[in-house]
Image (cartoon, rainbow, N blue to C red):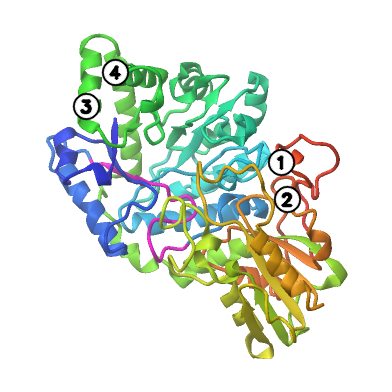
Amino acid sequence: MAQVERSYLPKPTEVARYGLGSVLSGGGSAPEPNTPKAWADMVDSYQRAALASRLAIPILYGTDAVHGNNNLRGAVIFPHNIGMGATHDPSLVWEAARVTAREASAVGIRWTFGPVVAVPQDIRWGRTYEGYGSDPALVSRLGAAAIEGYQGSVLGGPAFERLPSWALLATAKHFIADGGTSGGVDRGDARIPESLLRAVHLPPYRAAVGAGVGSVMMSFSSWNGLPDHANRSLVTGMLKGELGFPGFVVSDWGGVALLPGNPAAQIRTAIDAGIDMVMIPDRYPSFIATVVELVRRGELPESRIDDAVRRILTAKLRLGLFEHPFAERSLILGIGSVEHRTVARRAVRESLVLLKNEGGLLPLSGRFTRIVVAGRKADDIGVQCGGWTISWQGMGGAITEGTTILEGIRRAAGSRASVVYSPDGRGAGGAQVGIVVVGEEPYAEGRGDRSELGLSSGDRSTIAAVKGTGIPVVVAVVSGRPLVISDEIDGWNAALAAWLPGTEGEGVADVLFGRYRPTGRLPCVWPRTMSQIAFGSGEGAPLFPAGYGLGY
């Protein structure tokens, strides 16, 4: 029942000494060097230690492979879920999850903490991009498709068949209403009636259980003041009872330690609520000793421990870990392969939403011979991947392999047009058209919460510099959520929501140059003003409604 982050284990033999059920890599927790072989060697070392124990029960190695195996340098990185939501395509989501599973199992990872099936209701929330959109039906369809892709199921197939040897156990998270907290505050309180909880936030979990999801992760947030990690009526009553969830429930990172009381009281409350595995993630000897003592004193029934262990062991059996415990090294050659990148490039181009196309400026193909590309974000693989990429919060720069948007534009333009790059927009004179890439810097949970969602002054200055030359301007917005651009968009000739496209920036160029007609549709409303960033609030119509998207 104990899950420990690898950085807190002094040596692999601790797995056997304490009978740990799982080891994880948090965001950015990678071996040195960060290569497939080093990953496979590291994970297999923990697995060998587990198999040398008295009962020889293999561990589950987990990580947040939420848009590709995103801790591994060179792995294919897909658009974050908000972009996948804009595709409205379950088969594409399934295919992307399948690629992720193969690139993760190649190095021994058999458990992903995804998909996020939150239904974000306030885009101030810094995890908005981890959700597929604001419509429970859309999130339900795409979440179920991701689960079946990760776990190797055929879409619509049997829910509980034995999974392929490369499958990733999926995790629906974060139970429940993490996207409904007041003010969009991460780890906040969802102060909503049960009717709204059931209508908006529960349906994706019902769909996830129907798709055979192996695990569910609890939310740091609360519902009407009671932490989800402590809410027995939600975990045991609603999830396991009402929905009939047969898998196991895992806590979030250190979530049990945030509950009221001393460590013993925290552990007793969480496990009694129905949590089966605890992402501790550090003080495992004291956690294990405390659980044993609570059972000995009769404060935790042994039947509750038996139930938790049975659920965890069933998941390991279903994954075939006892027969295939080690990394699927034959799949390493597929990591970052052309085949896998082709799937990601398709996901990028299908995720793009054309917001404006004045005078049919787009597509650009064959119409212009002198093009200026502006904006620092146009040539930054880290920015276009966003958070949860190589590190927890993400970072700018050449953090992994792939194609930037600028590189994609240059390839698409070919020898027919000259492409000049200007990070700040200066020197655009002489060009016939400008493409300006603006948006957000990388972020993840906590740091991504923002009360103002407009463009930065630097981005506005870059656009103004290109516009000042008098040429038509296309603006591509790279962001994890809609930004408030109503004061600027009237001055743009064309606008494109590119979301956080990942490593395959050439997919953006595919749409700009007409290789692919835009088909993406907004998975949530695009607010006109800051008063509308909590969906359903504010006066007047939004800038663009949910479902909006132009074509050529």
Q: Is residue 189 highlighted in magenta?
A: no
Q: Which mark is residue 374?
A: none
Q: Quadrant of the C terminus?
A: bottom right
- Amino acid at the residue labelled 3: Ser
Q: Nearer the viewer, residue 409 or 205?
A: 409
Q: Residue at x 73, y 74 (%)?
A: 466
Q: Which mark is residue 264?
A: 4
Question: In the rendered image of this protein, does residue 110 appear above or below residue 415?
Answer: above
Q: Quadrant of the N terminus?
A: top left
Magenta segment, principal secondary structure? loop
- Judge the density around disc 4: few (<14), some (14-19), many (≥20) Cα neighbours within 10 Å: some
Contact between marks 1 and 2 (CB within 8 A): the answer is yes
Contact between marks 2 and 4 (CB within 8 A): the answer is no
- Judge the density around disc 1: few (<14), some (14-19), many (≥20) Cα neighbours within 10 Å: many
Mark 2, residue position: 484
Earlier residue among tags 2 and 4: 4
- Amino acid at the residue labelled 2: Val
Gap in Å between the C-alphas at discs 1 and 2? 9 Å
Gap in Å between the C-alphas at discs 2 and 3? 48 Å
Q: Residue at x 37, y 27 (%)?
A: 256
Earlier residue among tags 1 and 2: 2
Q: Which mark is residue 533?
A: 1
Mark 3, residue position: 286
Q: Residue 538: give x, y in percent of width and height.
A: 79, 36
Gap in Å between the C-alphas at discs 4 and 1? 41 Å
Question: In the rendered image of this protein, does residue 302 appear above or below residue 2?
Answer: above
Q: Residue 259: give x, y in percent of width and height.
A: 40, 22
